[in-house]
Image: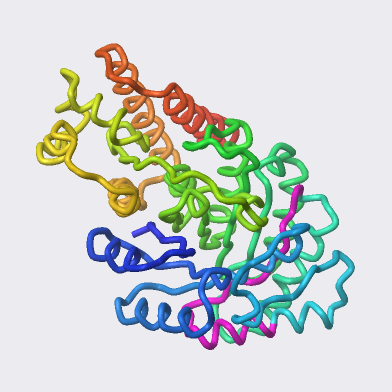
Amino acid sequence: MTFWLQHGYGKSNKIDTTDDMAELSGVILSPGDEERPALVNTARSLNQRNLEVLVDPQLYVHTIPEATARCHESNEVDFGRLSWFLSPAEISSQVEKVFELNSALRTDALISPGPYQVTFGDVWSPLSLQYGRASVDGANGPVYLSVVSEDSAFSNWDETQRYLDALTTIDAQGIYLIVGHSGRTYPLVWDPSRLAHVLRAIYTLAELNRYRVLWGYSDLAGLAGIAAGASGSATGWFYSLRMWSVQKWLPQSGGRQPNARFLVKSLMSPLERSAEAVSVARTSIGADVFPEESERASLIAEEPWSIADSWIQHLTAVSQLHAEYDNEAPVGVRIRALASQLGEAQRLLKHSGSEGASIAPTYGRALRSLQLGLEMFGELEGL
C-alpha cells in the first residue's frame, strides 16, 4: 500500500476512523500540532495498529521569515530563527534534538531536518545537504532525507538535476519530498512543466537511484508521484495538510468554514457536496459517475453531511484510488494508465456539465494539468 496520512491539528479520531475504513501504510506526525505527551500517545496508538510511524521535524518552519509552530517548544525542536551560515556544531546540535524526538516517539525511520528552499540554488541548498549528511552519520537506523522546496524550484531542470546529483551522494534509505505552492485555490491547478519536473525528480531518485520516495502533502497529485516511482504519498483532512504552503506556518486571522466536499473517484475531483456532487448524481449519467447505488441515493436524497464527514470520505477515497494501481508494473505502463484515467474523468465531467450539472471549471483544469504533466514527464524520460 502506498497511502500515508499527514497528521496535523484537530486529530480527534480521524486517524483511527480512516485506518478502520481504508488501507494505510503509515502516518507522518507533526511536532507543530501536538504537545510532546499527546504526540507520544499518538505514536503509541499507531504502533498498536501496526502502522509505520515517521515524524517530520519541520525545521523548515524556522527558515521561513515570521513563521511559527505552535508546539515545537514542547517537542524540543524550537530552534528559533535560523540563518544560512550555521556552523557544523549548530547543525549537529539540532540534528541531535531530532534524534531525541524520534527516540521518544519510537519511529520506524528518521526524517532528517531540512530548510525551506525557494530554488535549488539558493543559500539554503548546501545546508540542506549538510543536514542530510549529519543525520545519516549519527542515526542508528534508516533515514529519509528532507527535500522541501517551492514548485517554482522545479522550473529549472538543470539546477534541479545538479542538486539531485549532490543529494544522491548521501547514503540514505529514502527521500521525504515536500513541494510548496503559493496559490490557495483548491483543487490545485499545477503548472504542467513544473509537475513534469517534480515527477522526473521522483523517477531519478526512486527508479534510477533506488531511494524510497515519500511525497508529503501531495493529495491527488501523489497518484502521479506513485506512477513515477514514489513508494508513498501523503494527504490529510485539512486543505493545509493536502497542499503545503508557507502560509500554513504564518499567523492567520480567522477565516470562514470551508465547504463540505465529496471526492468523486470516477471524476477524481473533490466536488462541493451540497451543490455540485448532488447535481451530478441527478443527471442521466449519475449511475456512471456513482456506480455505488447507496452513495448516489444518499446524494440525491441530500442526506445530512458535515465537514467532518467530508474529511473522512476524502481520505478513504484517496486510499481507494491508491489501491487501484499495480505498483509492480513498469513506470511507463503506470503513467499511461493514470493519464487515461484522468482523461476519462475529464470526459465524465464534461458530459455531466452538458447534462445540466453545476460544476466549477477548476476541476477540469486541475485534471488536465495533471494529465499534461504526466505526459510531459513520459516524453522527457522516454517512457
Horizontal side, residue 355 vs residue 76: left or right = left
Horizontal side, residue 100 vs residue 300: left or right = right
Q: Residue at x 37, y 35 (%)?
A: 269
Task: Find the magenta span and give its range.
Answer: 96-119
Q: Residue at x 60, y 81 (%)?
A: 74
Residue 193 % position (x, y): 62, 32
Q: Residue at x 68, y 51 (%)?
A: 149
Residue 5 % position (x, y): 41, 61
**Residue 62 within the segment the image draws in magenta:** no
Horizontal side, residue 89 vs residue 48: left or right = right
Q: What colour scheme was applied to this rendering of the protein? A: rainbow
Horizontal side, residue 322 vs residue 364: left or right = left
Residue 367 % position (x, y): 44, 30
The answer to which of 260 and 99 lies nearer the viewer is: 260
Q: How many marks?
A: 0
Figure check: 27 above or below 138? above
The answer to which of 249 and 306 lies nearer the viewer is: 306
Q: Residue at x 14, y 39 (%)?
A: 298
Asked if residue 327 shows in the view, the reply is: yes
Q: Quadrant of residue 53?
A: bottom left
Q: Residue furthest top?
A: 354
Figure check: 365 above or below 304? above
Figure check: 349 above or below 199? above
For the N terminus, which image quadrant?
bottom left
Residue 238 % position (x, y): 45, 53
Q: Quadrant of residue 46?
A: bottom left
The answer to which of 72 and 174 lies nearer the viewer is: 72
